[in-house]
């Protein structure tokens, strides 16, 4: 570590260990690009999607990160011991490197705190001795832990550079440290504000190791507001293509942003890069629709839910969810399936029903009958025979009407459709939707194996800063410096980028809707539900919902009707409140106080 | 590849399963404990949930540190653990729906019995189920044993007897968030036809009523479950309900550029009431004869058909309202709803369904047996519109 190159290598390893919740992060852990995860994406455990084959678990053993976190912490602490002693470094360089170490330590403790609450804070490099008890550090309170993280962010902000380039372009900048503080402060503020929605009890609670008093909420929201504002005023970051002239242009811009974030240095605040095909990530392997698998043997595993699709606004009714209306009476709460008694609306194509929905729906989700990689993606659940007999989510069949043959799933060969066929259920969407955000628009070489996707991941991007700011302002009622107006503008900036022209008001419903659709499949939803204590409400014997496109052969020419219903093979999913904190491993030997109900 | 992945998967599963199969030379567990959770006043079992319900913490003596063991109480209020080792244990209920008891030390050996006599937070009394057409209706009262507010009540249905808040196919719940009087009668209902995904004809299902206090961490209290053979489920017809106004006459109506009868595509009968307006409008009707809605606040619904020629002219952020009152005037003895974007109105006819339970009350409580005023207004409309209204009625919806 005596040379600058040696230090770079050491840091590179720390960044590798750091808790980037990227394409290779899921319930199994980090760096699972080459692991058979059966394609369960983190958002498929938080209501934005389901896996085609498995009913994802929502259990407390998901996303654990304790031992690896403390190992990384130890490696970071070594820097604080060694860097001051390296005589070849200038004071400025030492300060910069120490700030970078503070950034990594804040990042590490944030990842630990959001999983476990109050933590043992070990901020010096411990020397092993035979007196094991001297190495044991008890847990601090949850509040002390968040304050430690805030302080670490401040230390990082002090000396990190504003700009990185060349080989250092993926290292943290001052803005990355502000963005981390913005995210962490919003998390802390939310826990203080919403702890009482799902209070726990027991020793860890009475000692303050988990939970915070509501009176602390506005303090953290204010820290979030200030950190976000520093980036907004900093002049280095902004939205990529903030002013599209048409909705189609917006759709294209947003697709490209996620296919390669390196085109958007103004938006990307911290990027995690992939280089070598074969040791990259596996988004294209698991999540292409069946028809465009590029050789991947188990595609089609990301099935966005109807709940998510309903959430996207319509350009005609700004500031509202825009649920898909399928029947003349407009009842959107009937999930009992097809009935001949109901008066369904008829559509010429399988995608007309989504007309006027937000650009981000079109750039995130593959809608039935739309084009992807040069193919029309067929997603059809069945048909209504001319005699009125429904054949829906049934075995594959075909029927000839007026000399034309129609197939239940939209084509004859199972390689030519992507939905609902239970003979090939693992490859077929069961929600009526497939997925394209982040996926390569061209065939991926080597995609028959894991790890051949190499597009980069934005851990922090400018849109999150805007929406963190808006949420913190609306939750705290903060109004200094025109904050209410700035927050409304921030909320509408990401909408405007998506082709909206009407501004909406700063309300918590509007901010949360915007957050859900802007960050869909960016692994944010799980933590949003955790920190706002909404998980147990969203998942309370909840069966995810599907939208079934069905070809109605009773009319000529045939038209499409749509059925809102529970997904096939769905099971009710519930979130146990104790899972707002994970179980700390090794209680028997580390003498820590366990989290409630474990 | 698929085969390889499957093979890897199976090999992982087997290696995990076989890992603990090596024989050891320890003795087999020789002790067991069982017992009941009993209500000190009624001597009945205290019902609970299998998941998220009552648990009992056992701390075995002679080890330090020692991880406590937790055993779950069954949903009927009994428990048993037959895989313990003879020893002295410290025993105390852990998560629970009754007032906490002190720890006790007990020697557990072969067939130890231990009952806990407790005071439940809530006692659910006078439970009565009826099946009315497609609807299972339950009435009951709640006795509070602490001053804390009741947070939520619910009726839960499932095919298994462990039915409850965590385990149910269908739930009908109401947030209470206030202390209740033990005389107060609560009513909850589940409509079978509206949940036909979950209820199969001629099968049996368990229904159970529960309530939970607002004390943090305290679990649901329940009455014993009831098994129903649900028979045939007939399709749910459109509710007949009570006519509020069938809109066949303009008598009492006022507003816009004056009401006229319109025979063009009425939704019921021969006419609808039609208004035209150059912009914002107020539409109202005064009833000479008050209407007895024959519905309650909890399950009542006001439904009507509403035609709007061009919804894009409305500023849907502007707070328009729909109101009914029993005072003959606005803003007194009133229920009102927002006439805003949440209605998701489209051009042409719309069916507007407004739950009385979701209305805001202003100017005192409405007398639902004597409704005599209706008003609907929206003052931010950017151009001429045509508005028609028809087929106004009240019914109860479960």
Image (spheres, coloured by chain):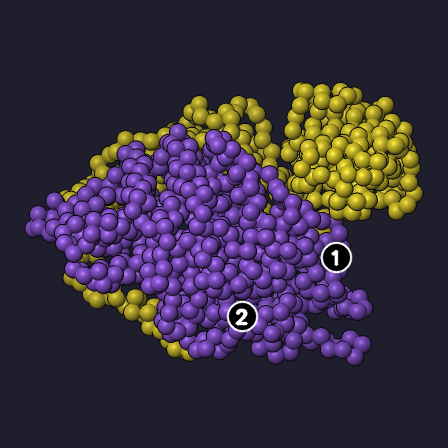
Chain colours: A purple, B yellow
Using the image, name the chain to which the residue with label 1 belongs. Answer: A
Give whichever of discs 1 and 2 has the lower sequence position.
Answer: 1
Residue drawn at (58%, 56%) of the image? A360
Foreground pick, B159 / A321 = A321
Residue drawn at (83%, 25%) of the image? B286
**In the displayed structure, would residue A206 be above or below residue A309?**
above
Judge whether residue A217 can be spotted in this image: no
Task: Indicate left or right for B338 with A424 as reference.
Answer: right
Element at label 1: loop
**In the displayed structure, would residue A199 be above or below residue A520?**
above
The image position of residue A474, as x and y in percent, is 51, 36
Which residue carries the number 2 mark? A441
Foreground pick, A340 / B386 = B386
Task: Indicate left or right for B370 with A454 as reference.
Answer: right
Looking at the rendered structure, which numbered label has been put on residue A240? none
Mark 2 residue crowding within 10 angstroms, few (<14) / some (14–19) / many (20+): some
Foreground pick, A117 / A458 = A458
Which quarter of the rendering shows the N terminus of chain A? bottom left
The image position of residue B254, as x and y in percent, is 86, 28
Q: Nearer the viewer, mark 1 or mark 2?
A: 2
Element at label 2: loop
Which residue carries the number 1 mark? A345
Task: Indicate left or right for A67 with A448 as reference.
Answer: left
Residue drawn at (69%, 28%) of the image? B335
**In the displayed structure, would residue B347 be above or below residue A35?**
above
């Amino acid at each position: 570590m005596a040379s600058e190159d040696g230090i770079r290598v050491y840091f590179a390893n720390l960044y590798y260990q750091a808790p980037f919740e990227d394409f290779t992060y899921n319930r199994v852990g980090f760096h699972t690009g080459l692991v058979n995860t059966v394609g369960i994406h983190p958002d498929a455990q938080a209501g934005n999607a389901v896996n085609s084959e498995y009913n994802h678990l929502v259990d407390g053993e998901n996303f654990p990160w304790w031992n690896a976190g403390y190992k990384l912490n130890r490696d970071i602490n070594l820097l604080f011991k060694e860097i001051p002693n390296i005589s070849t470094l200038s004071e400025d360089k030492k300060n910069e490197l120490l700030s970078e170490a503070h950034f990594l330590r804040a990042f590490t403790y944030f990842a630990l705190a959001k999983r476990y609450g109050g933590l043992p804070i070990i901020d010096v490099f411990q020397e092993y001795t035979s007196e094991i008890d001297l190495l044991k550090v008890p847990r601090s309170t949850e509040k002390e832990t968040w304050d430690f993280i805030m302080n670490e962010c401040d230390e990082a902000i002090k000396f990190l550079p504003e700009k990185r380039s060349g080989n250092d372009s993926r290292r943290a900048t001052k803005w990355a440290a502000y963005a981390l503080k913005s995210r962490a402060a919003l998390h802390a503020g939310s826990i203080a504000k919403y702890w009482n929605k799902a209070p726990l009890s027991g020793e860890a609670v009475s000692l303050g190791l988990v939970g915070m008093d509501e009176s602390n909420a506005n303090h953290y929201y204010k820290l979030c507001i200030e950190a976000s504002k520093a980036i907004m005023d900093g002049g280095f970051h902004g939205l990529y293509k903030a002013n599209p002239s048409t909705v189609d242009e917006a759709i294209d811009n947003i697709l490209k942003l996620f296919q390669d974030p390196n085109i958007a240095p103004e938006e990307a605040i911290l990027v995690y890069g992939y280089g070598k095909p074969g040791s990259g990530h596996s988004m294209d392997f698991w999540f292409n629709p069946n028809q465009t698998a590029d050789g991947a043997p188990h595609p089609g595993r990301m099935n966005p839910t109807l709940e998510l699709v309903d959430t996207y606004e319509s350009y005609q009714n700004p500031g509202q969810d825009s649920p898909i209306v399928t029947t003349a009476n407009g009842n959107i709460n009937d999930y009992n399936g097809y009935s001949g008694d109901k008066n369904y609306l008829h559509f010429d194509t399988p995608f007309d029903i989504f007309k006027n929905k937000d650009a981000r729906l079109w750039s995130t989700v593959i809608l039935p009958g739309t084009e992807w990689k040069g193919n029309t993606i067929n997603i059809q659940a069945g048909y209504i025979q001319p005699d009125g007999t429904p054949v829906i989510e049934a075995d594959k069949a075909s029927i000839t009407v007026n000399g034309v043959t129609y197939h239940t799933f939209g084509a004859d060969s199972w390689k030519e459709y992507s939905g609902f066929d239970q003979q090939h259920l693992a490859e077929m969407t069961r929600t009526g939707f497939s997925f394209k955000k982040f996926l390569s628009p061209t065939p991926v070489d080597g995609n028959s194996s894991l790890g051949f996707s190499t597009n980069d991941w934005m851990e922090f991007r400018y849109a999150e800063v805007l929406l963190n700011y808006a949420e913190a302002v609306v939750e705290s009622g903060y109004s200094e410096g025109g904050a209410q107006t700035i927050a409304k503008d921030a909320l509408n900036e990401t909408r405007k980028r998506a082709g909206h022209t009407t501004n909406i008001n700063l309300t918590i419903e509007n901010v949360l809707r915007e957050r859900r659709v802007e960050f869909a499949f960016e692994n944010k939803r799980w933590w949003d539900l955790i920190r706002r204590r909404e998980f147990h409400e969203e998942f309370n014997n909840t069966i995810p919902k599907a939208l079934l496109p069905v070809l109605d052969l009773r009319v000529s020419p045939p038209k499409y009707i749509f059925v809102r219903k529970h997904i096939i093979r769905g099971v009710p999913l519930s979130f146990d409140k104790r899972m707002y904190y994970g179980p700390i491993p090794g209680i028997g030997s580390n003498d820590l106080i366990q989290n409630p109900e474990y | 590849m698929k085969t390889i992945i499957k093979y890897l998967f199976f090999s992982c599963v087997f290696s995990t399963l076989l890992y603990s199969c090596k024989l050891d030379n320890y003795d087999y567990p020789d002790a067991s404990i069982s017992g009941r959770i009993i209500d000190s006043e009624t001597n009945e079992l205290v019902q609970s949930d299998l998941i998220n319900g009552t648990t009992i913490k056992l701390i075995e003596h002679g080890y330090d540190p020692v991880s406590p063991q937790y055993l779950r109480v069954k949903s009927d209020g009994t428990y048993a653990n037959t895989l313990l080792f003879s020893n002295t244990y410290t025993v105390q209920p852990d998560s629970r729906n009754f007032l906490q008891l002190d720890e006790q030390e007990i020697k557990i050996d072969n067939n130890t019995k231990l009952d806990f006599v407790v005071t439940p937070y809530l006692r659910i009394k006078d439970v009565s189920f009826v099946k009315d057409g497609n609807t299972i209706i339950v009435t009951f009262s709640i006795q509070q044993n602490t001053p804390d507010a009741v947070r939520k009540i619910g009726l839960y249905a499932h095919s298994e007897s462990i039915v409850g808040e965590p385990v149910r196919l269908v739930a009908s719940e109401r947030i209470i968030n206030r202390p209740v009087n033990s005389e107060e009668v609560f009513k909850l209902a589940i409509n079978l036809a509206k949940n036909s995904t979950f209820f199969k004809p001629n099968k049996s299902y368990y229904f159970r009523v529960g309530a939970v206090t607002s004390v943090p961490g305290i679990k649901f209290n329940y009455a014993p479950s009831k098994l129903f053979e649900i028979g045939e489920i007939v399709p749910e017809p459109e509710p007949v309900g009570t006519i509020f106004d069938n809109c066949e006459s303009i008598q009492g109506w006022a507003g816009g550029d004056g009401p006229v009868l319109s025979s063009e595509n009425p939704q019921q009968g021969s006419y609808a009431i039609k208004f035209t307006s150059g912009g914002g409008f107020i539409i109202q009707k005064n009833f000479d004869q008050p209407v007895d809605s024959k519905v309650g606040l909890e399950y009542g619904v006001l439904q009507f058909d509403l035609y709007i020629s061009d919804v894009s002219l409305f500023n849907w952020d502007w707070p328009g309202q729909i109101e009914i009152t029993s005072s003959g005037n606005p803003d007194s003895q009133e229920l009102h709803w927002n006439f805003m974007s949440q209605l998701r109105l489209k051009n042409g006819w719309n069916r507007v369904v407004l739950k009385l339970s979701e209305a805001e009350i202003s100017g005192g409580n409405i007398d639902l047996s004597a409704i005599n005023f209706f008003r609907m207004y929206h003052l931010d409309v950017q151009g001429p519109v045509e508005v028609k209204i028809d087929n106004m009625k009240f019914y109860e919806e479960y």
